Image (cartoon, rainbow, N blue to C red):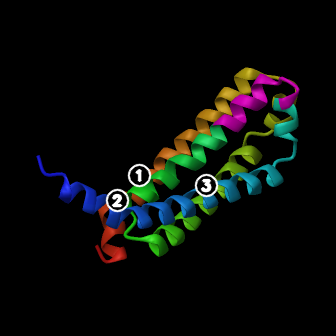
Amino acid sequence: MDFTAPINAFVSGFPDFIIQLAIAIGLFVASLVIYVLMTPHRELDLIRSGNPSASLAFGGVVVGLAIPLGSCLAHSFGALDLLIWGVITLLIQLLAFRFADMFLRGLPKRIVEGDVAAAIYLMSVKLALALILAGAVSDPNVSMIRGG
């Protein structure tokens, strides 16, 4: 069995893989930092102190930011395309998260108080927004705009 073609494909594609992975991880970490700075309460401190509602709410953020970014990664045509669409989707997602936090009045206080039901609801809203945004990025019309 000849493994030359798969090995050559791996060797030629590996640098692009590393570059796109680094861009995606960089965008992900930056968006998490921005989100932590945007929240009215200190979720990480609450998590460290054992608050399960803060952990659920922040887990929704982590997954909610990763979903559209993963879709950008899967549908990008290169590093620049990933960077542009990754920034756009993460900014939209951060704004949507902030809107959800503001729209669902009293939730930050309820999370601080350990209300798990409120945290599950907030997490669900954030994940739903992530799935919708990921679907929008994978729309064939977006590919046409990108020149695909």
Question: Which amino acid type is marked by label 3?
Answer: Gln
Residue with the mark numbered 2 = 139
Depicted 75 relative to depicted 106: above or below: below
Judged left or right of residue 81, residue 106 is: right
Span shown in magenta: 48-59
Residue with the mark numbered 3 = 93
> Disc 2, disc 1: CB below 8 Å?
yes
Question: Could you tell me which secondary element the residue under label 3 belongs to?
Answer: helix
Q: Marks 2/3: CA distance?
A: 17 Å
Question: Which amino acid type is marked by label 1?
Answer: Gly
Q: Marks 2/1: CA distance?
A: 6 Å
Q: Nearer the viewer, residue 96 or 88?
A: 88
Judged left or right of residue 21, residue 76 is: left
Q: Classify 10 Å Cα crowding around label 2: few (below 14), some (14-19), many (20 and above).
A: few
Q: Nearer the viewer, residue 134 or 3?
A: 3
Q: Residue at x 61, y 55 (%)?
A: 93
> Disc 3, disc 1: CB below 8 Å?
no
Q: Position of residue 44 (x, y in %)?
A: 82, 38
Q: Residue at x 35, y 75 (%)?
A: 145
Question: Could you tell me which secondary element the residue under label 2 belongs to?
Answer: loop
Instruction: Point out the tag, 3 or 1, that comes first from the N-terminus.
Output: 3
Q: Position of residue 8 (x, y in %)?
A: 26, 62
- Whether residue 1 appears in magenta in the rendering, the answer is no
Residue with the mark numbered 1 = 135
Question: Which amino acid type is marked by label 2?
Answer: Asp
